[in-house]
Image: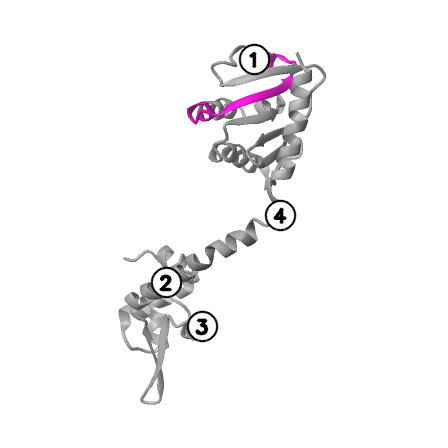
Amino acid sequence: MVNELILTNLGLSPNEAKIYLAALESGVTSAQRIAQKARIKRTTAYSVLEAMVKKDFILKTDKEGKAKYLAQNPKDLAERFRIYQKNFENVLPELEAIHNKKEVKPKVLFFEDEEGIKKIYEDTLKEKPEIILEFNTSEFHKTFPGFPEEYLKQREANNINALRLAPDDNIWKKHKLTDKDELSETKLLKNFNIPIEINIYNNKVAFMSYADKIGLIIESEPIAKSMKKIYELLWNKLK
């Protein structure tokens, strides 16, 4: 059976996907018959069919004074989407030029709860930076038992290095001893028990607040460059 997800990826709603498949199997038929086959209420099927007629996924004809419907040939739809893709590719350079204008606002992504914060760490790996500049906190290890070790393994596997500014406590003293294995260089700071972590990588700056269980990623080259400069100034002042 054709996966309805394939059709929804083409811009159809779940009900539209069901209607199209039902109409495809039925040939020229009534809205009632399509509704029964799609297992959708008849009143809903009527409105969905009319919307699909406007989108040219369904053809509507009058037979013996009654409305009949016929699904468009899938090959015709495939050709239509090939034309859409070609047209889009033709204007892609212009769209990219608009996207890359300096006046484009920074992109900000907001995350909630522990799973959301984990997605931020996943992004630091997905971006594959050469190095991550980290303001670390011990709250990372307290909030996610076991996850920091798994994250380190993935970072090492991706050959991503890190500079780490961390609190001078037992957790980070232990990690400092394994800097080489963890592709890191760690500098410890006294009285640096902050409840958030900041990661600077590529053109992104990520903030993870463990007290609030929230996080955000700011994607902005000027902001990332400024944060990197601040980090480097502090790093170079420390022994």
Which marked residue is nearer to the observer: mark 4 or mark 2? 4
Q: Which element type, helix, strand or loop, lies under badge 3?
A: helix
Distance between the alpha carbons at the discs numbered 4 and 2 = 32 Å
Q: Is residue 17 above or below residue 201?
A: below
- Which label sits on residue 51? 3
Q: Are marks 4 and 2 in contact (CB under 8 Å)?
A: no
Specify which label sits upstream in the sequence, 3 or 4.
Answer: 3
Query: The magenta stretch spans which residues?
Result: 154-175
Give the quadrant of the C terminus: top right
Q: Residue 40 appears at what percent x and percent y?
A: 40, 67
Callout 3: 10 Å neighbours few (<14), some, many (20+)? some
Q: Which residue is mark 4?
A: 102
Distance between the alpha carbons at the discs numbered 4 and 1 = 40 Å
Report the amino acid beneath label 2. Answer: Phe
Which marked residue is nearer to the observer: mark 1 or mark 3? 1
Residue 217 shows in the view:
no
- Which label sits on residue 176? 1
Report the amino acid beneath label 3. Answer: Ala
